[in-house]
Image (cartoon, helix red, strand yellow):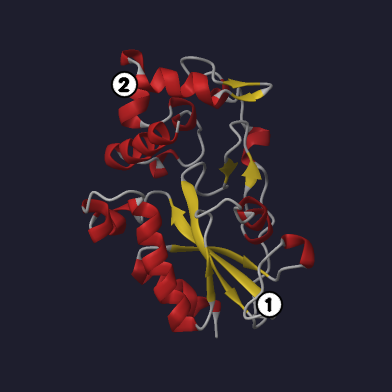
Amino acid sequence: MKLSDLSRDATAAGLSLRGAFHPRSEDAVPGVDGRPVGTLVLLGWASGRQWPDFAASPEAGDGEPHPLDRWSKRVIDAMAETFGAMALYPFGGPPYLPFQRWAQRGDTVFASPLGIYVHPEHGLWHSYRGALAFAETLELPPRENRAHPCESCAGKPCLTACPVAAFTPKGYDVERCAAHVRSPQGAACRHGGCLARRACPVAPDGAYGPEEAGFYMKAFLAAH
């Protein structure tokens, strides 16, 4: 099996291949039928390209809870069956699988000042929807050696763009953020997405459109 075959099918299904790696014991990847995992392939979205596939799906319009998680599970479960893999997801816990650790192992991402992983090409506009675990050790391309985009960012505008300074040296004040987004003053964040995130100068063309940004903000408010 080739990674290019997985990438082709992921694209057809409305996903993006977001990296792959050969797990070590410390990566805490569950075994496949009692056997160690030889290769873990990450699947997700990047730069808003896949939103229309989800938006047109039955899950997006049926009014039931967690539409994106249900869509992800349906699509990735089907890929797992096609390729003889085990599907793994960042949702459904607790406990939750360490997808952030896996992203650092399999993709070219770095911690940003906002706590979100930044990608040199996609900026802050990307996500991981699941993974495929293979018992086989698949051949993988060499990892790209890319520079951390935040280290050369002048002024770090993401840290000053939040209207209520929810991002501080102590971390992210989620309660302050949620209260603002719910308020009349938070309409710009509520309908257009996080202003701090949108201030990032990396990949501005990949920023989420109003429909996608509103969807995520609605989910954020429902959880907080």
Q: Nearer the viewer, residue 13 or 47?
A: 13
Q: Specify the label residue 193 is tagged with.
A: none
**Dot 2: few (<14), some (14–19), or many (≥20) neighbours within 10 Å?**
few
Label 1: which residue? 38
Q: Which image quadrant is residue 173 in?
A: top right
- Where disc 2 sits, the SS reads helix
Q: Secondary structure at mark 1?
A: loop
- Amino acid on which disc 1 is placed: Gly
Pick the residue in front: 90 or 93.
93
Q: From what the image shows, is residue 118 above or below residue 17?
A: above
**What residue is shown at x 42% (from left), y 35% (from top)?**
220
The answer for how far apart the CA atoms under marks 1 and 2 are is 47 Å
Q: Residue 22 at what x, y percent from top left?
A: 70, 71
Return the residue at label 2.
Answer: 187
- Seen at 65% across and 83% down, the residue is 136
Residue drawn at x 31%, y 36% as measured from the top left: 214
* Residue 197 visible, this orientation: yes
Q: Quadrant of the N terminus?
A: bottom right
Marks 1 and 2 close (CB-CB < 8 Å): no
Report the residue that reaches farthest toward the bottom.
1
Horizontally, residue 145 falls left or right of residue 63, namely: right
Query: Three-letter amino acid code at disc 2?
Result: Ala
Whether residue 161 can be seen here: no
Along the viewing direction, whichever of 106 and 63 lies nearer the viewer: 63
Task: Indicate the position of residue 164 as horizontal and vertical percent values.
Answer: 49, 14
Q: Quadrant of the C terminus?
A: top left
Tell me: residue 186, above or below residue 32. Answer: above
Q: Which of marks 2 and 1 precedes in the sequence?
A: 1
Is 94 located above or below residue 131 in the figure?
above
The residue most toward the front is: 94
Mark 1 surroundings: few (<14), some (14-19) or many (≥20) residues within 10 A = some
Q: Position of residue 162 (x, y in %)?
A: 49, 20
